[in-house]
């Protein structure tokens, strides 16, 4: 199964260079494999009973254990000694929690807690203990961001694991400022504008050119982004994530092999989102068909009305472009056939040579020398570029409708 999904343009220049935009990286198996750094002091352990179970050995966090801290947070088997004032300053949840009267020792031991409660009966170094039902890694990242400020990375898989954890807890504990910063950071990889999308794709293409075809690891799985957006109520991330996900073939989405690991069936997407994905893929494929069909129409404004005389070379090259696009994207179903934004940009390349380099001086795809006849007709090239811009903007605005998204 072909897992690399960078599309080959209709024709590639002789020197092997690719056009600037890029569909997604390798298959959905690229889930985060980030391992958090070791931040627990295993030589400083404190025994603390939990209910009726056997004692466990929670360990102090090496960085987030302040000697003047006023409360101990426990997440899994890691202890964080931090300041109530710092938590209350940033989090409306903790501010309200610390302002509430705490149950007495008798009532705390007689009834099982139904919500987060501060344990004042089993203090650690004079500090009450608050048990959090979150992963230690996520709590660590949240506290680091609160004390030192967020230190976001390049929106790759490891960075996504950190940022998504921060976003989940910032949403859960009402840390509004941190939630906003995390969403702004994620929106650079999952933008709401076509300009932002093109910038994202340029980064992916640059990474692929450096790493090799099919080796880009710039972005995490778009399925993970859909799941996160649903969990934290961030609908602005959904259109670009669904669009990115739709560019994979169904075999990449639903089949698993030993080489590439997980498929989408291993991810907890809801049935409703799976339906949205299927409907969106169908709509995006129809958009490509409609795009090429409109170019092939003899009444298309690109063919008529831009000059007072008939340019046979323009008509010939334009017809050749339509024929190549039909064969490549509709009949052969080659790579790139599921990405209408990419197809529209490819079809907007100037009407000359279709990327065939004519010499060593031709450095990139689309920079080959024009014939003298075609170079005389700048009107057609300008009209084609304007048409491409309009079509791509129109398609970008249609993405939420394709995937039935309420954004």
Image (cartoon, rainbow, N blue to C red):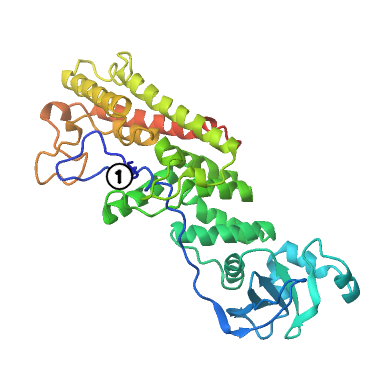
User: Residue at the spot x=32%, y=13% of the render?
Assistant: 299
| 119 relative to 269, above or below | below
Whether 18 is drawn above or below 174: the answer is above
Q: Is residue 95 left or right of residue 282?
A: right
Q: Nearer the viewer, residue 171 or 123?
A: 123
Q: Is residue 348 visible?
A: no
Location of residue 113 (image quadrant): bottom right
The quadrant holding residue 388 is top left
Residue 282 on image: x %, y %? 46, 28
In screen coordinates, is 92 left or right of 395?
Answer: right
Left or right position of 111 against 173: right
Q: Residue furthest left?
A: 359
User: Few, some or many C-alpha atoms within 10 Å of disc 1 (few <14, some 14-19, many ≥20)?
Assistant: some
State the residue position of label 1.
Answer: 20
Q: Residue at x 60, y 68 (%)?
A: 136
Q: How many marks?
A: 1
Taking 210 as reference, is 160 left or right?
right
Task: Please report the residue visible at 38 percent of the width from the left and 50 percent of the height from the top.
Answer: 258
**Image coords of residue 220 (percent x, y):** 45, 52
Q: Residue 247's image quarter?
A: top left
| On-image quarter of the N terminus | top left
Q: Nearer the viewer, residue 16 or 332?
A: 332
Q: Position of residue 221 (x, y in %)?
A: 46, 49
Question: Regarding mark 1 in the picture, which secondary structure is present there?
Answer: loop
Residue 64: percent from left, percent from top: 60, 78
Q: Is 383 drawn above or below residue 3 in the view shown?
A: above
- Between residue 180 and residue 69, name the one nearer to us: 69
Rendered residue at 72%/69% (across/down): 131
């Amino acid at each position: 199964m072909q897992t690399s999904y960078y599309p080959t343009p209709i024709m590639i220049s002789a020197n092997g260079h690719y056009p600037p935009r890029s569909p997604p990286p390798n298959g959905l198996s690229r889930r985060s494999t980030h391992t958090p750094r070791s931040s627990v002091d295993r030589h400083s352990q404190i025994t603390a009973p939990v209910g009726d179970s056997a004692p466990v050995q929670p360990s102090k966090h090496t960085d987030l254990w302040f000697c003047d801290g006023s409360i101990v947070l426990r997440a899994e088997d890691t202890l964080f000694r931090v300041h109530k004032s710092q938590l209350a300053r940033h989090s409306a949840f903790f501010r309200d929690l610390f302002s509430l009267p705490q149950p007495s020792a008798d009532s705390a031991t007689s009834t099982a807690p139904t919500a987060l409660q501060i344990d004042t009966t089993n203090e650690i170094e004079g500090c009450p203990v608050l048990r959090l039902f979150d992963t230690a890694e996520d709590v660590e990242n949240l506290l680091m961001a609160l004390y030192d400020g967020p230190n976001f990375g390049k929106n790759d898989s490891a960075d996504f694991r950190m940022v998504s954890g921060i976003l989940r807890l910032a949403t859960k504990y009402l840390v509004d400022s941190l939630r906003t910063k995390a969403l702004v950071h994620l929106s650079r990889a999952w933008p709401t504008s076509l300009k932002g999308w093109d910038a994202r794709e340029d980064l992916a293409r640059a990474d692929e050119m450096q790493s090799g075809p099919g080796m880009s690891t710039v972005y995490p799985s778009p399925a993970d982004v859909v799941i996160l957006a649903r969990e934290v109520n961030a609908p602005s991330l959904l259109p670009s994530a669904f669009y990115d996900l739709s560019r994979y073939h169904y075999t990449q989405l639903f089949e698993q092999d030993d080489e590439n690991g997980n498929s989408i069936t291993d991810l907890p997407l809801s049935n409703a989102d799976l339906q949205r994905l299927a409907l969106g893929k169908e709509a995006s494929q129809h958009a490509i068909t409609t795009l090429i069909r409109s170019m092939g129409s003899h009444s298309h404004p690109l063919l008529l009305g831009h000059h007072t005389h008939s340019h046979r070379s323009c008509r010939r090259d334009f017809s050749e472009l339509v024929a190549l696009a039909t064969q490549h994207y509709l009949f052969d179903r080659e790579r790139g056939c599921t990405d209408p934004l990419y197809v529209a940009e490819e079809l907007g390349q100037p009407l000359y040579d279709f990327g065939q380099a004519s010499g060593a001086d031709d450095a990139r795809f689309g920079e080959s020398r024009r014939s003298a006849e075609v170079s005389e007709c700048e009107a057609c090239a300008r009209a084609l570029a304007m048409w491409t811009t309009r079509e791509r903007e129109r398609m970008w605005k249609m993405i939420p409708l394709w995937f039935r998204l309420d954004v």
